[in-house]
Image (cartoon, helix red, strand yellow):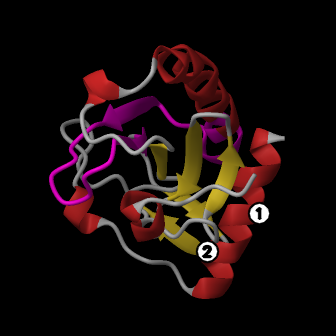
């Protein structure tokens, strides 16, 4: 059965940015990379309040976050990881997943700095890598989730 993607999924590029799809969640590579490997964890349900997601979606979050942390560790060897639930512009339940590190990371010759380290991540400092770099990063992250 094909997923009827809601607005928030589409905003973050679904299905083109899909890293992994679960029963209740999609993990997407964030088009604007705040730090190397920035993701968005989007609930597939048509809900706009965290308390409205199903108990099954809550239960599945444990596996999704474990997969995210295991996969991203191999991609960028983060020092910390932040999950930000903001939902101010994009209404459906989703979390921005930002890998945090004290020293820059380089991927395909592009330097990724964590400009907010060690404080709050600077979401406004995110940038869209060139399409070729983004495609290679998406492949790399997908492989890390396999």
36 on left or right of 90: right
Residue at far front of view: 1
Task: Examine the structure image and report whether residue 94 is included in the region drawn in magenta.
Answer: yes
Q: Position of residue 105 (x, y in %)?
A: 53, 55
Q: Tell which of 104 and 94 is nearer to you.
A: 94
Residue positioned 68% across, 45% down in the render:
21
Above or below residue 67? Residue 109 is: below
Identify the residue position indicated by label 1 in the image.
139
- Classify mark 1: residues with Cα within 10 Å, few (<14), some (14-19) or many (20+): some
Local secondary structure at mark 2: helix
Q: Position of residue 62 (x, y in %)?
A: 56, 16
Residue positioned 58% across, 46% down in the render:
26
- Classify mark 2: residues with Cα within 10 Å, few (<14), some (14-19) or many (20+): many
Q: Quadrant of residue 32?
A: bottom left
Task: Examine the structure image and report whether residue 93 is included in the region drawn in magenta.
Answer: yes
Q: Which quarter of the rendering shows the C terminus? A: top right
126 on left or right of 79: left
Residue positioned 25% across, 57% down in the render:
123
Local secondary structure at mark 1: helix
Asked whether residue 32 is in view, the answer is no
Q: Position of residue 113 (x, y in %)?
A: 39, 59
Asked whether residue 59 is in view, the answer is yes
Residue positioned 66% across, 34% down in the render:
23
Q: Quadrant of residue 97?
A: top left
Above or below residue 136? Residue 119 is: above
Give how far apart the Cα atoms at labels 2 and 1 are: 9 Å
Point out the stretch of residues depicted in magenta: 72-101
Identify the residue position indicated by label 2 in the image.
134
């Amino acid at each position: 059965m094909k997923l009827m993607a809601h607005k928030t999924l589409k905003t973050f590029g679904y299905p083109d940015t899909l890293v992994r799809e679960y029963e209740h969640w999609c993990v997407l590579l964030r088009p604007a990379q705040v730090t190397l490997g920035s993701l968005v964890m989007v609930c597939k349900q048509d809900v706009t309040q965290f308390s409205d997601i199903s108990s099954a979606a809550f239960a599945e979050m444990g596996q999704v976050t474990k997969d995210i942390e295991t996969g991203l560790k191999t991609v960028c060897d983060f020092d910390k990881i932040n999950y930000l639930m903001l939902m101010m512009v994009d209404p459906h339940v989703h979390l921005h997943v930002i890998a945090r590190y004290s020293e820059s990371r380089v991927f395909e010759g592009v330097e990724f700095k964590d400009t907010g380290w060690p404080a709050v991540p600077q979401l406004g400092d995110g940038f869209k890598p060139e399409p070729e770099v983004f495609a290679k990063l998406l492949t790399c992250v997908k492989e890390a989730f396999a």
